[in-house]
Amino acid sequence: MKKIGALLVAVAVIGLAILLANFRVNPYAYFAGYVVLQYVVIATAWNMLGGYAGYVNFGTPAFFALGAYTAIFLIEAFKAPLPVLIVAGGLVSALLGLGIGYLTLRLKGVFFSIATFALSVVLQTLIINWDYVGGAKGFTLIRPPAPFFGNWGVLLFTVMVALAVVTVLVARSIERSWIGRGLAALRDNEEAAECMGVPTLRLKLFATTLSGFFLGVAGAPFPYYVTYVEPSSAFDLNYAVNALAMPMIGGTTTWLGPVIGAILLGTAQQIATVTISSELNLLIVGVVLVLFVVLAPEGLTGLARRLRGR
Amino acid sequence: MNRPWTWKLLSFTLVGAVAATLVLAGAGVFVARAADPIKIGLGMALTGGLSANGKPALMAIQIWKDDVNKKGGLLGRPVELISYDDQTNPATVPGIYTKLLEVDRVDFVVSGYGTNLIAPLMPIAMERRLTIMGILGLANNEKYKYPNYFQIQPSGPDPEANWATGFFEIAARQNPKPQTIALIGADAEYPRHAIAGARELVKKFGFRTVYDKSYPPSTVDYTPIARAIKAVNPDVVFVASYPPDSVGMVRAAHEIGLQPKIFGGGMVGLQFTTVMTSLGPMLNGIVNYDFWAPEQTMMFPGIKEFFAEYQKRAKEAGVDPLGYYLPPYAYSAVQILGLAIEGSKSLDQQKVADYIRSSEFSTIVGKVRFGANGEWARSRVLQVQYQGIKGIDVEQFRVPGKKVVLYPEEFKSGNVIYPYSAAQK
Amino acid sequence: MFSWDLLANAVVAGMLLGGFYAAVSLGVSLTFGLLDIVNIAHPAFVILGAYAAYVMNSSYGLDPILTGVLFTPVFYGLGAGVYRIYYASFERRGEESLRGLVFFFGLLFIIEVALSLKYGVDYRMVDAAYIGRSIDLGGVGIAFRLLVPCVVGLLMTLTLHLFLSRTFYGRAVMGVSQDQVALRLMGANPVRIKTIAFGIGIAAASLAGALLITISPVVPSTDRDYIGRVFAITVLGGLGSIGGTLVASIILGVAESLMATFFGPSWSLAVSFGILLLALAVRPAGLFGR
């Protein structure tokens, strides 16, 4: 499918979402849908580094929360509107990605992963002690009446649809470009790629920065969605697990994998929240993740590919 | 992307997900309703950090539902309870309550347990002008001043300060009056509030602060902190902590022999049975906040029956076996809601709210009247002192005399043993 | 507020804590430092050991450390089993990095959630004769609750060091980390050696868990506090060096203790990780690394 085709599909999806908003399907769907779409962004963003480049980021909560807290800071200081929050949240998390990448990507991949985990802890401690954005007490947002749809649930849902579409488009175009091929080369064998002249360090930094950007973008509207943000739930480990599980289940080599993984796992979790005990639901995520990693490492897209005999 | 299988996979997934959500959303419509019950909905922390209290709280609310239905329900209709697990995660609250209101179509909602879980509910309640009973949250309505919010926590008009007022009053009453105080609290929501309140009280009562620090909740060892406090030799030590840190601080204090004249204040967790039976005699002498104690002065109508039922169910469910902390308050919250519905003879949110605001209720935790911002008109945070605890047998905690109520005056059941070291002999 | 007495106490408490941290990190030092397997689920196994001690203590009154020792064979078997799965799924195919990490992360999650389901999220503690008592050595108070785990931790470190340097299998483990082909040529099966080593690592977790619950109450999510600490220690100490792990543990313990005593405990955890990040940036081989 050519580039224009993809763009048309993207615009159509966003248009459909806006249309849906006007028909006011049961409001619950917007809240649940927001979470699933948020995970589409998170999973796709994670996969830019994890799937395409092979570097595992355990610190998803740090980037996500940083996006949310950047938004909070700007709301407190300048009463900035939502689009500014989204871009700013993305940029700050991108900087974090660049920074951590610069510190650790010259070392073995596992050090990057440990560093990202440590990063989450450090950042959480910093935020807990920063009273301007609420600190440990948390930050409460009093929402003004929603522009456009008059209803925040619907508006945020639509915004998230747009963000998800943009993220997937970016992932897809990277995948097909020379950047994507370079990343795939270094994922398979970094030394060989280096020998072949692939600028591995720069590509890695690019991937970390971009991944960080979109993780921050996913987090920026969060204060508006939940109206009360406090560190332990913003830095929740579940974000880390899901960011891993969704691409693993869907498949890490293509943009489609994280999308499918996010939709399937995200929807399943939303349904489980309102039906069975949530702890069993968590257990199931863990078991499914391990099963997929052991038995079907290429995820559902890999399985589908094999079924089709390719 | 010319591969047709990817599109098939994607569309299959999307269709499946959308269908599942629509079925879920629409399910409410198709289920036949028997005898048209009154539905009360809530999210509660059944998993995650607060579930140790959340599960008993839900159990207490279920006991109320059964009690009410035994007597014929509300307004002649049975009461149905719909609850979901909020996982102690505020991000689930908007989704859960939207489902309760839009899909399950509940008549009333009650909050989850804890300040963090009540906070995201406030905008939803305000947008739809709902009447909500809050279950143990601190100062949730401070910013909003929403009139239809009512909080069952007995903190009273100035929640931050009232938490510790009793503790400071008791300290200030002693002769000679203590001079210096050390403040220590965890880096978390409630302890921060409590310490902020304590700082105001330090000024009000004229103490001198010689130590004022906080620690991260994941601290393993409290001996350095206890030592640092001992080094400045304070007369009073005020601690605002969560269960694991409370245990850590008490143990550390004992190990290094930290013996101020008064110790305690805002330690969460000392009220839990597992902690009481684990610390045992180490608790002696600690003056701490509490909401209920099995003293004669606290035996309100209905509370004995409630505990009998609760303790029976708690044994099977494996939750706090005594339930002397949150459960009776969770029960009273819905008890008040039920009384208001009966009293105003309506299910209209505003009428019920007005009724609650203007009445005094007789509940299993005593007489309750609400004041500004939905808090109790008068604070009733107790200060208790642990006295005469021997060994770790749980039975001793069922009888009066081990957790003596010192404050407020109308519920006082004994005298303080002062200084702290005297209680440990 | 500074006094030599306070400083001495803080340092001693930190060293005792360090001995305990060493016990917790030994398993990772073995599996990650020597075998290059990033078992981030190790803290979850430690918590599992802590719960085993709790159950034995509350049902039968068994001393927690005794339980820890008794359960070592069980945990050894568990570790061996986990390694076999890991090997069959990843190492054989040569895809360790990404998938292996995720595998262990999933394992961590499963263990934590399974414990929550079975035991709930109430804090669990144990009771033993030495908890709550302390002795005074020249102005420095030493709590048994910290002393005993520290001593056990030191013993564990010593035992492991002796095992690695004096026994056949121990030296084979050191060999496996250096050159697998040469090892095969010498008649030892690397897979078998790694299984043994991994099993030992997890067996250490059993004992470490018993020590943990002796020091402070435990809840299933306690493992998260230790993931970072354990890897910080292993990296700081230098991969492949057991002695380095001990030194790094003590450094971390003392750093946290000093921070808590003099600057307020808020920053101690973050400072520890700051050390890790700094070490990674400046000297990734650690203090005693190969």
Image (cartoon, rainbow, N blue to C red):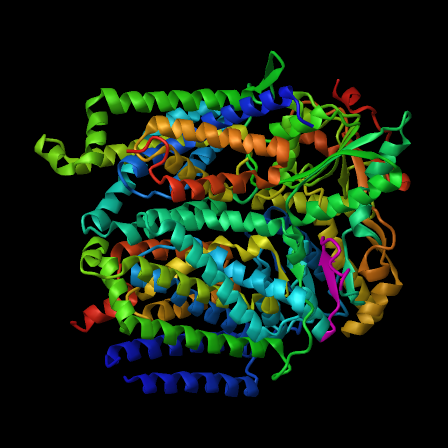
Front residue of C29 and B209: B209
Quarter occupied by the N terminus of chain A: bottom left
Provide residue C110's location: percent of width, then percent of height. 40, 49
Residue B80: in sight, yes or no?
Answer: no
Query: In the image shown, does C243 or C59 lie closer to the viewer?
Result: C243
Q: Residue at x 49, y 66 (%)?
A: A90
Q: Main secondary structure of the magenta part?
A: loop
Q: Position of residue B372 (x, y in %)?
A: 85, 60
Question: Does residue B137 belong to the magenta stretch?
Answer: yes
> Who's the residue at 47% across and 28% down the image?
C18
Q: Is residue B187 above or below residue C212?
A: below
Task: Answer above or below: position of B294 versus B310.
Answer: above
Quarter-wise, where is residue C156 in the image?
Answer: top left
**Is residue A38 shown in magenta?**
no
* Quarter of the C terminus of chain A within the rendering: bottom left
The image quadrant of residue B33 is bottom right
| Residue range corresponding to the magenta coloring | B128-143
Residue C152 visible, this angle: yes
Counting the numbered discs, the total is 0
* Image location of residue A128, percent across then percent down: 61, 50
Identify the residue shown where x is 26% and y is 71%.
A178
The residue closer to the viewer here, A129 or C120, is: A129
Give x and y (percent) for residue C54.
49, 32
Say left or right for C85 vs A270.
Answer: left
Q: Is residue A145 left or right of residue C184?
A: right
Q: Indicate whether A59 appears above or below B147.
A: above
